[in-house]
Amino acid sequence: MKKSLFLLLAITLVAPTFAQKKGKPLDRPKLVVGIVVDQMRYDYLYRYWDKYGNGGFKRLLGEGFSYENTHYNYVPTYTGPGHASIYTGTTPSVHGIVGNNWYVREAGRATYVTEDKTVQSVGGTAEAGQQSPRHMLTSTITDELRLATNFQAKVIGVSVKDRGSILPAGHSATGAYWYDGVNGAFITSTFYQNSLPEWVTKFNERNLPAQYLDKPWNTLLPIAQYTESTADDVPWESAFRGETKPVFPHDLPSLSAAPATQTKAALQTAGEKPPVAAARNLDLIRSTPFGNTLSLDFAMEAIRAEQLGQRGVTDFLALSFSSPDYIGHQFGPNSIEAEDTYLRLDLEIKRLLEYLDKTVGKGNALIFLSADHGAAHSPDFLRSHRIPAGSVGPRIMRDSVQRELERRHGAGNWVLAYDNQQVYLNRPLIAERKQNLRQFQDEVADIVLNFAGVTRAITSDDLQKSHWESGMLMFLENGFFPKRSGDVLVVLEPGWLESYAYPVNKGTTHGSSGNYDTHVPLVFWGWHVRHGESRTPAAITDIAPTIASWLRIQEPDGCTGKPLVEVLR
């Protein structure tokens, strides 16, 4: 009797839920906007809090839901894998994007993450436009939205970086557009379409990059107020080419001036006539906050021209702000340049939210904001405060392993490449010399462990024959794809990074499993998002299945993440 009463009570409680769904149209947001900020550490949300306005980051956090303990769960933490993992809901071990570049054994050369020589450039130079998502082996949440709506939903990817636009937009996108710094235009490839839409052509004709570069980059606030940053002139920051010191104001008009022959030659390789703007180095805008402004200008024009979120079907805009990454690499995370970039980005977020309120309507857009990775502190900055840190040179690492193998086994090209902190060995040569590959890998791991800054080295054979649920080895396993990864994976000590100008340390980089690289923001805002925050651990791979659950569509086909229940309640 008690059991029957309990069952009746349970049915009574859940019945209204089912009744609400019965006979009503499927409830979905009009527009989903995925915002990825390239190289945004989690602490940037709060480091500059007192200087943010009320309409940008503070509005997202004040009205939305923030996961304060969101991390990447693999290495290497780079731009390509980061964007792919956010939108596929899985790690490089499944989607195959193991770096921004990796060595292809069959071809005997490295490849770029979105390189595709089977397609042609549309609207730009040949090299800049021969790009597509073909290397990504799984579907994305944007692909699944297209499939769920029988391709009625529009999906547009926008970024000044090709990989920041292409990978989020997915394989079946309506369009993906990225910036060509040679002709100062947003371009695409024949993977998507054979000619630029009229609205893109008209946008490019406005020549906004040149206009933004016509003014110096000075601080938004009086420079004395940038108390969250180091002094303007420190030895671990890198100056722009043409500057004597990395200090404000940065004279963009003179820095962007370049001989016309430099850009004309590049354009002529694509069989195009160089526009007037080709007389300037328009690529410079990437390394300024105005690259973010340009990206948002283009994204807002895409919303207007494509009527995103205004057509009676859910659309998706994948927007990546890439300039913080260029600026962070050059100046480091403690620079006034980095702080100024985020204060200005705060204004861009405000501009976007207000535009969505006006065009799509308040409460009708669903937004998530995250980052593709964080960033380490500059080693020299840390050492100036007696905190352990250091750097290694990738080329020196490769050459050192090669020399030691020659000493032990004789002449031969034993090391084919050193990419993504991984050693690629010459397997045919190892077999020819009748060496055991597993033992050879173990030998190389032992060699690498003797190098300064290296805390661990593990072979690909060990990774494939074992499984780890947590810790450093889990990060390595999740980032490992046998057909694309190396033979020996190297782990550096905390605070250590790869310096391509070694032994000089300028700016910063990323790629490790350190919290400074893995801990990123994750904020949901808008349609059906309740206000709140959680410190429950969340993985970056949880974003795609959470969006899928909201939209009531299938999660991406390789998805290993789980919906974030707290924000869905």
Image: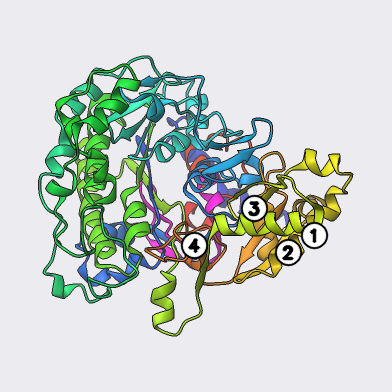
- The residue tagged 2 is 447
- The residue tagged 4 is 517
Which residue ends up furthest to the top in the rendered image? Answer: 194
Q: Secondary structure at mark 1?
A: helix
Q: Nearer the viewer, mark 4 or mark 1?
A: 1
**Residue 8 appears in the rendering:** no
**Dot 3 or dot 4, earlier in sequence:** 3
Report x, y in % for residue 192: 42, 21
Q: Which residues are magenta?
A: 519-545
Q: How far apart are labels 4 and 1 at the CA level?
A: 29 Å
Residue 257 picture quarter: top left
**Dot 4 or dot 1, earlier in sequence:** 1
Q: What's the residue at 89%, 44% (across, down)? A: 434
Report x, y in % for residue 14: 56, 48
Q: Nearer the viewer, mark 2 or mark 4?
A: 2
Dot 2 amino acid type: Ile
- The residue tagged 3 is 422
Q: How many numbered marks have been drawn onto this rendered protein structure? A: 4
